[in-house]
Every structure is written in C-alpha cells, then in structure tokens.
Image (spheres, rainbow, N blue to C red):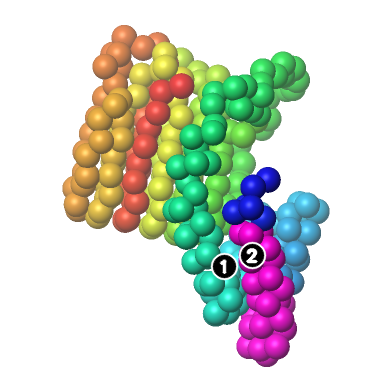
C-alpha cells in the first residue's frame, strides 16, 4: 500500500471518529439516527420472520439515517476528501487494473442449479399483497407463470421472465405506476408487444431508445407474428422509464 492510500485512510478514519462524536454530541442528529436505525432493524426483523412485505418503514428509517449523516459537516468533509483523492489518483488506480484481476469475479462463475418441481398451485381467488412504495423484483427464482397485474405508487420494478415457462399463445404483464423505473427481461424466442403510456419518460426496446412526453406508444418485436409464445406488456407510468430486454 503506497503512501497516498495510507494518508487517505488515516484522514478518513480521523474524520469518521469526529463524525461519530458530532452525531452523538448533537441531540437532533442522534435522535434522527437512532430512530432510523431502530426502524431499519425492526423492518428487517419482520421481513426475516415473514410477517410483512412492506418497505415503507425501511425506507423511512434509511431516510432518517441519511438525514442524520447529511446534516453533519464532517460527513461532507469525508466526501470532499474522497473525491479529491480519486480525482488525483484515479488514472493510476485504473491503469494498474487488467482483465486478469477479474478472472475470478462472482459474475463469471458458473453454477449448477437443480430445479425442484411441485404440483401447480391453486389460482382461483389467489390474492397477493404488494407494497405501495419500494423496489421489487419478480422472478428471482424459478416460478410458475401467472399473468402479472399490479399497481404501485413509487419504486423501481424488475420482472424477470427467464425463470418461468410462458404458455403458448398470449400472456400479459400489466403495470400501473406513479414514479420509478421498470425493467422487463424476456426470453429471445418470445414475441413482444408493448403498449405504454407516460407523462414523461424514456422507452428502450430492441436497441432503440426514445423519450415520451404525455404520449402513448405501441411497439412489436420483429418476430412477433412468427412466435408461438407471445407476451403483451401494458404499462401506465406517470414519471419513469421503461426498458424491455431480450435475454
């Protein structure tokens, strides 16, 4: 480790100690930080116990903690010193990197996944509780397909259709959202139809990207008519981007 790194770590460490002292010395900061930490811990504990799937208190707690940090002068001093350090030493850091350094990166490791099958679940009167605020990913693991239809006030959404088997003919994804980005991952052999409307946002599909302002658009993939499996994506978003990617 060279001298510049040692000096950087020493300065950041001293500022971090000062930051903790400043937070604990200021009543408003310690109250905001303490309440925020309690909300985050309580929410994560409830999630682990599978008692709820609401991210409102988690987001509120994180915002309180961030507010406590942003209100401290020494936190901004840490950011300024970090920016100056990487501006002065960035070229040296990146020039020493090569492809071999990432040969064992986690995203390059291959993994064998054994899929366990089970009987089809009952679809009649099936109810799914979704939160109003927060990011969500549908399709983290293998799942049985059922048409997706939900509304959310704010948050980023990822729908991964690569972990399910779409039935023949048409399937539907219907999303109504106030604010946030939406990304939908679709297998390459599936025909795609997009019907999208927004007050302001960008649409990315089949290598093209364009902005919309209080407009609606209907798009088809190049092989839509020839595909035996089709997905119709219907989205209404006030403010936010839509990205549909073939995988």
From the viewer's side, name the closer residue of 27 and 74. 74
Disc 1 crowd, CA 10 A, few/some/many (<14, 14-19, 20+): some
x and y, in percent, of residue 238 in the image: 31, 56
Q: Position of residue 46 (x, y in %)?
A: 76, 59
- Pick the residue in front: 113 or 170: 113
Disc 1 secondary structure class: helix
Q: What quarter of the picture does the N terminus occupy?
A: top right
* Circle count: 2
The label on residue 95 is none
- Viewer can see residue 33: no
The stretch of residues the image draws in magenta is 7-35
| Residue 17 lies in the magenta stretch | yes
| Residue most extreme to the front | 3
Magenta region includes residue 189 = no
- SS at badge 2: helix
Magenta-colored segment: predominant secondary structure: helix
Crowd around label 2: few <14 · some 14–19 · many ≥20 (10 Å): some
Q: Specify whether residue 85 is in view.
A: yes
Asked if residue 105 is positioned above or below residue 201 in the image, the reply reads above
| Residue drawn at 35 percent across, 41 percent down | 242
Q: Which residue is mark 1?
A: 78
- Classify residue 126 by image quadrant: top right
Task: In this rendered view, identify the residue nearer to me: 124 or 190.
Answer: 190
Name the residue beneath numbered marker 2: 12
Q: Are marks 1 and 2 in contact (CB under 8 Å)?
A: yes
Q: Residue at x 78, y 52 (%)?
A: 48
Q: Which callout, 1 or 2, points at the residue further toward the start of the chain?
A: 2
Residue 205 falls in image quadrant = top left
Marks 1 and 2, how far apart at CA: 6 Å
Residue 208: x and y in percent read 25, 30
């Amino acid at each position: 480790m060279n001298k510049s790194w040692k000096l950087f770590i020493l300065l950041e460490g001293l500022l971090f100690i000062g930051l903790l002292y400043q937070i604990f010395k200021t009543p408003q900061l310690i109250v905001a930080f303490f309440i925020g930490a309690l909300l985050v811990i309580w929410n994560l504990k409830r999630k682990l116990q599978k008692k709820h799937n609401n991210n409102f208190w988690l987001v509120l707690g994180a915002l309180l903690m961030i507010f406590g940090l942003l209100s401290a002068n020494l936190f901004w001093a840490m950011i300024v010193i970090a920016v100056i350090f990487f501006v002065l030493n960035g070229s040296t850091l990146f020039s020493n990197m090569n492809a071999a350094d990432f040969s064992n990166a986690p995203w390059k490791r291959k993994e064998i996944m054994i899929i366990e099958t089970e009987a089809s679940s009952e679809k009649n009167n099936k109810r799914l509780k979704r939160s109003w605020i927060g990011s969500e990913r549908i399709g983290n693991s293998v799942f049985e397909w059922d048409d997706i239809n939900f509304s959310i006030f704010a948050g980023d959404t990822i729908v991964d259709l690569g972990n399910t088997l779409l039935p023949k003919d048409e399937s539907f994804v219907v999303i109504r959202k106030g604010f946030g980005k939406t990304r939908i991952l679709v297998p390459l052999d599936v025909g795609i139809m997009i019907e999208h409307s927004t007050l302001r946002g960008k649409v990315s599909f089949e290598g093209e990207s364009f902005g919309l302002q209080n407009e609606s658009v209907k798009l088809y993939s190049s092989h839509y008519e020839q595909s035996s499996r089709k997905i119709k994506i219907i989205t209404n978003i006030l403010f936010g981007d839509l990205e549909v990617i073939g995988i």
